[in-house]
Amino acid sequence: MGKTMVMKIMERAAHKEVHAGERVWCDIDRSTARDFGGANCALQFDEITENRGRVWNPDKIAFTFDLQAPSHSEKVANNQKIIREFAKRQGITRVYDINHGIGQHVMLEDGIVKPGDVILGTDSHMNLLGAVAAFATGVGNTDIAASWLNGTNWFRVPETMKIEINGEFPRGVSMRDLLTKIVGDLGAGGLDFLAAEFCGDAIERSTLAERITLCSMVTEMSGKIGLILPNGPVLEWLADRAGGEVRERVAAIKPDDDAPYISVLKYDVSKLEPMASCPDAPDNVKPVREIAGVKIDQVHIGSCTNGRYEDIAAAYDVLERGGFRTAPGVRVIITPATTEVMKRCAREGMIEKFLDAGIVFTNPTCSLCTAEHYGALPGGDVGCSTTNRNFIGKVGKGSHTYLLSPMTAMATAVRGVITDPREIVCK
């Protein structure tokens, strides 16, 4: 019997043969904590070690300030200070402070994520790093603190579902629409503790941004990790950032032809239409045409799911075709994933055009993933967003959110009601 990608990754980290369902101890390549939870990890580590002991390897630990950056309260500021002081005392140099952006994206850009890595983090969407075939998973503060002791953690080896995606997206339809379709088909528990391998010609042609989008919502289906084998321009981008070693890593974790899959799903994106997650759950999925005309108070484009340059550029294209105007009374917020993304938007003149259209273009953060950010919705308001969750009250008590692609979100901003982007981009 052959091996799946996740099995090969975990064999490398466990230094032995592994089988699905088995519990194994794995070496950790990177253990990370964000500003939300990072302070508690540092305090807990000091508590469980004698005389505030030393971490196992400061070069393999990173802190990311992305949830509440810059700090918006004294409490948050104090927590960030705890992290900075802990990192300085421990010799941890990778502290991506308030001027960087979303942690997973920043680490990718900085070249510290490689195919086959085992990575821990305090973010439930760490598994978006599966976009470059890293086994990354969100864990609790205790697991993080414990991993800092000796650089290991235990896991149950997941079974794997194969999802084959072929065809070419029609104009106005994107990877986010496919992802929404998959979430609706499988439901909130459809990938319960499973790994998902994404393959097919549509995946072979996909950009890094599209792969991040696809892997970012595996969590919303209760999955452990989504994995895509880097190839083409994505592999070259990664090798340029992380080193030529990534090519050997990719070859080593390629799934075997006879790898065991619990099931195989197939999608043809050429038949896809714009999709939406309706209030108040990501798996409450409908075609956009069925909810077109719903009045919206606020539009948000960004997050770890759709905050890359390509996502913002897609929204920009819709805005341009809509005459660089947004509907009166609709608040529109765009948040880039990282400073690197923001700089590119600035170089290409996009930010000024967004601002001229009355859009708020923010610093790079996780932004409106929760009500803890600027732009929270008041009770009774209806918003649409490109984030990954729309549970009731997630961005404001008594509010409701539709999850849309960047193109559909901007089309909605232009018209003031939920709008199929093909009505604008296909004119």
Image (cartoon, rainbow, N blue to C red):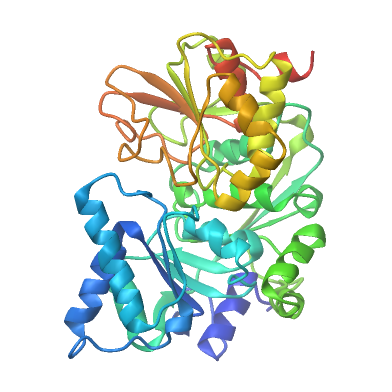
Which residue is at the front of the view, 120 or 328?
328
Quadrant, the N terminus: bottom right
Q: Position of residue 214 (x, y in %)?
A: 61, 48
Looking at the image, residue 68 lies above or below residue 313:
below
Instruction: Determine the residue positioned at 65% across, 29% down.
Output: 315
Image side of residue 12 versus residue 254, left or right: left
Instruction: Determine the residue positioned at 76% across, 30% down.
Output: 271
Instruction: Determine the residue positioned at 60% across, 15% down.
Output: 414
Instruction: Determine the residue positioned at 79% across, 33% down.
Output: 270
Looking at the image, residue 168 lies above or below residue 213:
above
Q: Position of residue 265 (x, y in %)?
A: 66, 49
Image side of residue 345 versus residue 205, left or right: left
Q: Position of residue 357 (x, y in %)?
A: 59, 19
Q: Is residue 214 visible?
A: no
Image side of residue 199 versus residue 113, left or right: right
Quadrant, the C terminus: top right
Looking at the image, residue 327 lies above or below residue 130:
above
